Amino acid sequence: MDVKLRIHRFVEDKKWVQDYTLPVTVGMTVLEALTQIKEHQDPTLSFTCSCRSSICGACAVRVNGNAELACEILVENLMKRYDTDELTIEPLGNFRVIRDLIVDWDPKYARIKKIKPTVHPKAEFSAEEGCKQSPEEFNKFKKLAGCILCGSCVSECNKNSWNQDDFLDPFVFVKAAKITRDSRDKDPKEHLKAVVDAGLWRCFNCQECTAKCPKGLDPAGAIEKLKEATFKMGLDDNVGARHAKAIYDDISDSGTLDESKLNIKSEGFFAAGLRAPMALRLMRVGKMNPLDKHPVNKEIDTIRKIVKNAEAASKEEN
Ligand code: SF4
Ligand code: SF4
Ligand code: FES
């Protein structure tokens, strides 16, 4: 059985799609297919790889629109998944392309630096002994340390596709969640403040990053945990945190959202005033009436129980 790979090429400002056909062998990964093409059909095809064991993160590409680790994913499984003998391979999304499937990581490393990503050790630190850490303390961030910087999460991040300038890459939030949980660090608040300033509350919450992570990490969940931590550390004087708090209060009080007051509570009276034309339009078509009494959901007791259980579950996780 043959597979046709439609590979997006990019060389010195010239873009095109080039087709290659090759026989599929049992257990052949996408990386093996790319390597065969390079060795036997077209030495000009460029891509990156190193470990070939899902450890280094260097080989991630997009296959049929979804980020994958090329050294992990099997060609035969992709053909079954998409029910086709034709696969389209592109470089990761939301990266600048250097050549063919090779993308530029330099701007991403610069963005990691925004969160001050290294441990600022406590006073007990010494070059000989380091800092003491119990297994329980290590386990608090162990999973987050499994990020291999493959970039699959940012490739499919909808906020990054919309605008990268006021946000970070999902893996940067994973790194931030890791460092703010590391007991050896003397000031998690400093990292957290940097994360808030770099766009923590601008996440669209679309969950694409979590769905695409080949290591089973949960960048979207890490973002939610960081938001939670901002309340505990008193970094909640911003629109995003006030908006979340207003929703929490409405749901706990009545089980329904009071849309007419939500913006005022989140943005303040004057900033919300700028939205007055939209509010007037909503009132005109009967979608909103500030004079209406805010309704209480008849299932309010159940809703309060759900809120309580969610809070208890979150405490246990921490
Ligand atoms: S949940 Fe947030 S960070 Fe993750 S992909 Fe969506 S917008 Fe990006
Ligand atoms: S969080 Fe997952 S998808 Fe994102 S870079 Fe790390 S390992 Fe890759
Ligand atoms: S080559 Fe290292 S993860 Fe694929």
Image (cartoon, rainbow, N blue to C red):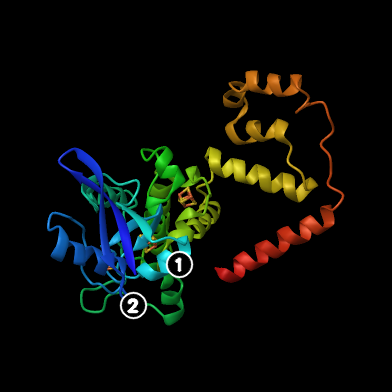
Whereabouts is ligand 2, in terms of quadrant? bottom left
Residue 175 vertical placement versus 248 (above, below) = below
Of callouts 1 and 2, the N-terminal one? 2
At horizontal 45% and vertical 67% (from top left) the residue drawn is 80
Q: Nearer the viewer, residue 225 or 270?
A: 225
Q: Position of residue 60 (x, y in %)?
A: 31, 60
> What is the CA distance from the residue labelled 1 to the residue labelled 2?
13 Å
Q: Position of residue 32 (x, y in %)?
A: 25, 69
What residue did someone put label 2 on? 26
- Residue 175 visible, this angle: no
- In the visual, does 254 lie left or right of 314? right
What residue did someone put label 1 on? 80
At horizontal 42% and vertical 51% (from top left) the residue drawn is 156
Answer few, some or many: residues within 10 Å of disc 1's Cα (few below 14, many 20 plus, some between 14 and 19).
Answer: few
Residue 176 vertical placement versus 137 (above, below) = above
Picture quadrant of residue 118:
bottom left
Picture quadrant of residue 243:
top right
At horizontal 41% and vertical 52% (from top left) the residue drawn is 65
Q: Which mark is residue 140?
A: none
Amino acid under label 2? Val
Q: Position of residue 285 (x, y in %)?
A: 75, 22
